[in-house]
Image (cartoon, rainbow, N blue to C red):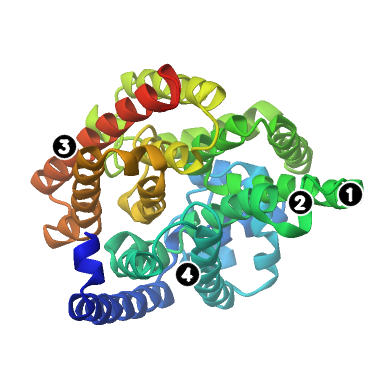
Amino acid sequence: MNKVINNKKIYVILLILLSALAFVSMIQGCRNAWRDSQDFQWDAAKVLTLKINPYDESLNPSGVLDDLGYDKYYLQMEANQFPSLLMILIPFTFLKPLTARYVWLVFNIILTGVLIVLLRKTFLKEMDKRVFTLLMLLMIAGTPYRNQIGVGQHTIFSFCFFLLAVFLSEYCELFDRNSGNNKYDKIRFWLVCLCLFICYFKYTLTVPLVLYFIYKKRYLEIVVSALFHVLLTAVAAIWLNDSIFNMIIKPLKVSSALSAEGGLDFGVLLNGSSLANVLMLIVMLLLFVLALKMVEGHDEALLAILVMWSLIVIYHRTYDFFVLSAVAGIFTDKVFISNKKVYSSFLYAYIAVLLSVFFVLRVFSESYGSKLFVGIVYYLFTIALSIFVFRNYFISKEK
């Protein structure tokens, strides 16, 4: 790989090719979002502010929304987010539906830039600049990112705030934990809590990722950020004249209808069987133990495992898989680098996973055969990587 990157002609060709593909992908994603941002959930947040229960209207439409005219912009309401998460979108509800859609698109594009900067500042900080540039262009050129933008999803938003929480907690020089400045440390604490609170918007991705804070022994930030949601859930129950229990169970009922319609996750693999939930709990327990007991100093390795599993333990469509770019940080880990044979094997396998997910699925329109092939590649890589991490960073002592 280094020989390819160090060859100036090959690098320039790759740079031009990926830049062109990324530009086309971004333009097409924006065009799609301009016409349709069905997953934005502006409509659900809006009716929440009007004291109309968005979950009841999603499960059993009463017709009360017909006169509001939101169906012109959002074909069907699917309020599958908890009320405390919908409240994050309330600022957008002051805008008209179409204006809000355009603002959300611009917001996602800006956050893409922020996300790239944060990856560079955190988990990909040791990566060669040329490799990092190509990787980010590949991410934007891929189908998952384009579809993420096009359908108005929230993964860019949530992943960006997760990375911001990590950056503020560990890497921001303004909040040096060894400075002894209690004032700055308190500010840092509350900012991290706020970022974690927001990042839960895409909880199917970020709840597994927040195990990173277990690894860092930052327990209080997790508790406080979760308590914000508990408090707002109670507020929503009072606002909608419903029970707290319903504020939790009704969004889950809406989302459960999609459990067998994801990309490569357990739900798809087991055709919506309840066994998928059992497997999810087992994997999450193992990841929790890994985060709790893992040898310190291997941030990139832990994040790689958390990202890989987060995309398959629970429902995810393939538009969320652009976050696989963050997994590349593991190839800067000293244990990986010290074992050239292992390094090369995993590197080529990782490239195969990226190309399969980013392009192969789209070429074959996510047909059953293409999903089966890509799924096998993805699961084999994830399991092999997990075994390597457990053996080298958990069960065995650091070499």
Left/right placement of residue 389 relative to residue 123 reads left
Residue matched to label 1: 181
Q: Position of residue 158 (x, y in %)?
A: 55, 53
Amino acid type, callout 3: Ile
Q: Residue at x 77, y 53 (%)?
A: 175
| Residue behind mark 4 | 73
Task: Classify residue 385 as left or right of residue 399.
Answer: left
Residue 176's tag is: 2
User: Is tag 1's residue or tag 4's residue first in the polypeptide sequence?
Assistant: 4
Which class describes the residues within 10 Å of circle 2: few (<14), some (14-19), or many (20+)?
A: some
Q: Is residue 65 visible?
A: no
- Counting residues from the N terminus, which is met first, the one under dot 3 or under dot 2? 2
Q: Report the Cα–Cα distance between label 1 and label 4.
A: 50 Å
The kind of residue on which mark 1 rests is Asn
Determine the CA span between mark 2 and mark 4: 46 Å
Dot 3: element: helix
Mark 3, residue position: 376
Q: Is 161 on the left or on the right of 304, as rendered?
A: right
Q: Rounded to the nearest whole Å, what is the CA distance between mark 4 and mark 3?
A: 38 Å
Q: CA distance from mark 3 to mark 2?
A: 43 Å
- Disc 1, disc 2: CB below 8 Å? yes
**Structural distance between the alpha carbons of marks 1 and 3:** 51 Å
- Tell me which residue sits at (41%, 59%) in the image: 127
Mark 4 neighbour class, 10 Å CA radius: few under 14, some 14 to 19, many 20 or more = some
Is 222 above or below relative to 274?
Answer: below
Q: The residue under label 4 is which amino acid type?
A: Tyr
Task: Say above or below: 118 vs 95.
Answer: above
Label located before the other in sequence (2 or 4): 4
Is the Cβ of the residue at disc 3 closer than 8 Å to that at disc 2?
no
